[in-house]
Structure formats: structure tokens, C-alpha cells
Amino acid sequence: MGLLDDKVVLVNGGSQGVGAAIARAAVREGATVAVTGRRPEPGEALVAELSAAGGTAMYVQTDLSDADRAKAAVAEVVDAYGRVDSLVNSAGLTSRGTLLDTTPELFDAHIAINLRGPFFAMQAAVTDMVARKASGTIVNIITSSAHGGQPFLAPYVAAKAGLIGLTRNAAHAHRWDRIRINGLNIGWTATEGEDATQRTFHDAGDDWQDRAAAHLPMGRLGQPDEIADFVVFLLSDRSGVVTGSVIDWDQNVLGGLD
């Protein structure tokens, strides 16, 4: 028996990186999976991969910065499969900005993707669960930087810290509906998106992961498949009654000083 047998799982931002790893892990554990993303090519390629491996999957083209599209994506999955049992909000914008140089447009972009999109996706998914009087699970992929972060992540931190508050608020509001909502503050992770970010904003070369690893306690960056296994656990009944938890998935310890 897989941990997610007969479950319908929607992964926002699931066409690449951590989201794609979560989609693969969910299919491996028996779930029917829908993934959203802005670009059809990686989304459709992932669905083809999952289908070839014997899974059931669909791609929904969605720009989560549009609240209506965030809600519509949930509706499309419900239309296709009858319900959404689990939701993962994995999409994220990590463009740089400090308190002093962030424009209103950049700030709004971060809020739209990192907070508003998850809010309205959760609204739609929980509405479906409540209407069916069914239990469900949600995991929000957040960031360890939400505790404070680097100066150049000001709008990102502001939005993701809001997602922490939303996670706990929604978990409290819907605990009697038996809808469990948790968050994962992930640390530095080796993804396609992070590679692009390092090259775009920090002039990183091909050896940037090796250089970064040398300064990390475990000697390497986190890996998407490791995060995916943890998320599947939180989505599944194996995580018991846990709700409203925001877990630091990182190799640095909050509050620890050398």
C-alpha cells in the first residue's frame, strides 16, 4: 500500500524543481496527481514522464499570481477527478530586493505568487473538502529565510512570513473539519530555479554548488527528492493528527550561535 493510495493531489508549481519531485513521489505512493505551472513544456513533459511510469497525472497551465486562475486550477482538477484530497503550494518567486531598493511592483509580484496565490488555492481546495464533508491535507512550501533572511530577500521574506501566518490560521480554522494544514521551511536546495537565481543575481559559475557545499554543515545542499519524501509523509495519514506545524527543514539551527 502506498502512503497516498487513491488520493488526488494538486501540486502548484509542480512542473519543475521541488514541486516536480513532490509530484513524482506522490505518484510513486499511489496518488493521482495534477501539477500547475506557467510554461506548458516542462509541465507536459513531467505528465508524460509520470504517465509512462504508470501513474495518472494532468497538467493545468496556471499563473498563480492571478487569484482567479489559482482558484480555477482547483476547479479543473475537481472537474477531472471529482475532488482534491491534498494540496501542495510549491510555486515561488525568489527575485532579489532590499528594503531600500524594492519597488512597489516587485513587492506586489512577491505577494502575488508567494502569498496571494497560495491563499486562494487553499480557499478553493478547502471549499471543496468542506462541501464534501471530507478530510484533507495541505502542505505549504515556505523557506527558512522567513525567520529573517538575507537583506537582499526583503520582499520574499515579507511574503513567505505571511504564508507562515496563513498556514497556522487556516489550520486552526479548519481543524474541526479534519483538514490538516502544515508548512515546511526549506533551506538551501539544489534546483533548476536556484541554479538560475545564483547565475542571474550572484554571478555564479558552474562550481557554485561545490563552493556553497563547503560552507554547509552536511557538506551539500538539500535535494528535492528528500523534501518530497517529507511532504508525502505530511500529506499522508502516517503523520497522524499533526496540523498547524511549520517545520524547519534545514541543516542550520534557528537561534544557534558559534
Image: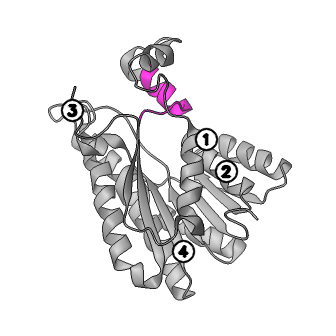
In front here: 129 or 185? 185
Q: Residue at x 63, y 69 (%)?
A: 76
Question: What is the three-letter code of the residue carrying label 3?
Answer: Thr
Mark 1 or 3: the one toward you: 1
Tell me which segment is drawn in magenta: 187-199
**Circle 3: element type:** loop
The residue tagged 2 is 25
56 lies above or below 50? below
The residue tagged 3 is 98
The residue tagged 4 is 136
How far across and down, in percent of the image, does residue 12 sit? 54, 55
82 lies above or below 52? below
Q: CA distance from mark 3 to mark 2?
A: 36 Å
- Is 26 positioned to the left or the right of 156 in the image? right
189 lies above or below 112? above
Screen quadrant of the N terminus: bottom right
Residues at marks 2 and 1 touching, judged by CB atoms closer than 8 Å:
yes
**Circle 2: element type:** helix
Question: What is the three-letter code of the residue carrying label 2?
Answer: Ala
Q: Earlier in the sequence, mark 3 or mark 2?
A: 2
Q: CA distance from mark 1 to mark 3?
A: 31 Å
In front here: 241 or 118? 241
Q: CA distance from mark 1 to mark 4?
A: 23 Å
The residue tagged 1 is 225
- Is residue 190 covered in magenta? yes
Question: What is the three-letter code of the residue carrying label 1?
Answer: Asp
